[in-house]
Amino acid sequence: GDSVTQMEGPVTLSEEAFLTINCTYTATGYPSLFWYVQYPGEGLQLLLKATKADDKGSNKGFEATYRKETTSFHLEKGSVQVSDSAVYFCAQRSQGGSEKLVFGKGTKLTVNP
Amino acid sequence: GAGVSQSPSNKVTEKGKDVELRCDPISGHTALYWYRQSLGQGLEFLIYFQGNSAPDKSGLPSDRFSAERTGGSVSTLTIQRTQQEDSAVYLCASSPDRASYEQYFGPGTRLTVT
């Protein structure tokens, strides 16, 4: 079945460091791909999305490119801030049928000053 | 505007008791989802409602779990004869329509079964 695999955390970085969180997916078709973020004490929020191959989603300095050939959607940020400390979830939504999101297990990021 | 709200925010119950969790979606959103977030399993889909269509119940883990959505708005997730493995955070999300890609999540209900 459809699944999402993302790098296990936790990830600890210093402020202004470069961030990469790897995400790969398996799907029968061409799903839409998402990154959600959960800040401490808050609900899940959509961070960015891409709906077709080679699309790049971006928001708040974060980027991810939909790579069909490697079935990947890696999250990157050039310079992280303390306020980026959160849990990041990669997810896919299949075309047609159920509209459910299939999530990775989440990666906890801590950014130290 | 108001987001998705859920109640209660925390619920502690004894094994074997029934619990009801409530979700108020964003006004006008026709799609509503329930997910479960637990340490061992991550985020799992439970059930999906879209307008007046039959719900997609494919994610419900057992027949002890059920959900309904009254009047196309408020939804209640019911867990009967709770077990310790039901302990998790139950998340509700809503979406403007089936074609919309974004799901807006509520803050969740933390359920602890003792």
Image (cartoon, grey):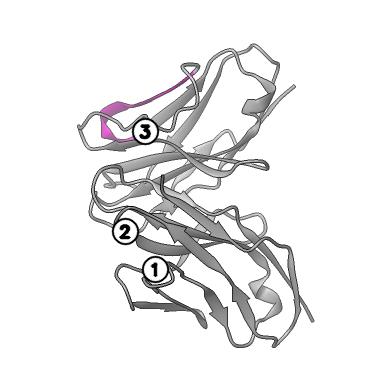
Tell me the kind of residue under disc 3.
Val
Rendered position, B42 above or below A108: above
Pointers 1 and 2 within a single chain: no
- In the picture of the structure, the residue carrying the numbered disc 2 is B101
Give the class, few, some or many, for how many residues have Cα within 10 Å of label 3's Cα (few <14, many ≥20): some
Q: Secondary structure at mark 3?
A: loop
B72 magenta-colored: yes
Q: Position of residue A15 (x, y in %)?
A: 73, 84
Q: Chain of mark 1?
A: A
Q: Is residue B69 left or right of residue B111?
A: left
Rendered position, B83 above or below B24: above
Residue found at x 43% / y 63%: A34
Q: Position of residue B74 (x, y in %)?
A: 37, 33
Tell me the kind of residue under disc 1.
Lys
Residue found at x 70% / y 62%: A9
Q: Secondary structure at mark 2?
A: loop
Q: Secondary structure at mark 1?
A: strand
Residue found at x 65% / y 85%: A18
Pointers 2 and 3 within a single chain: yes
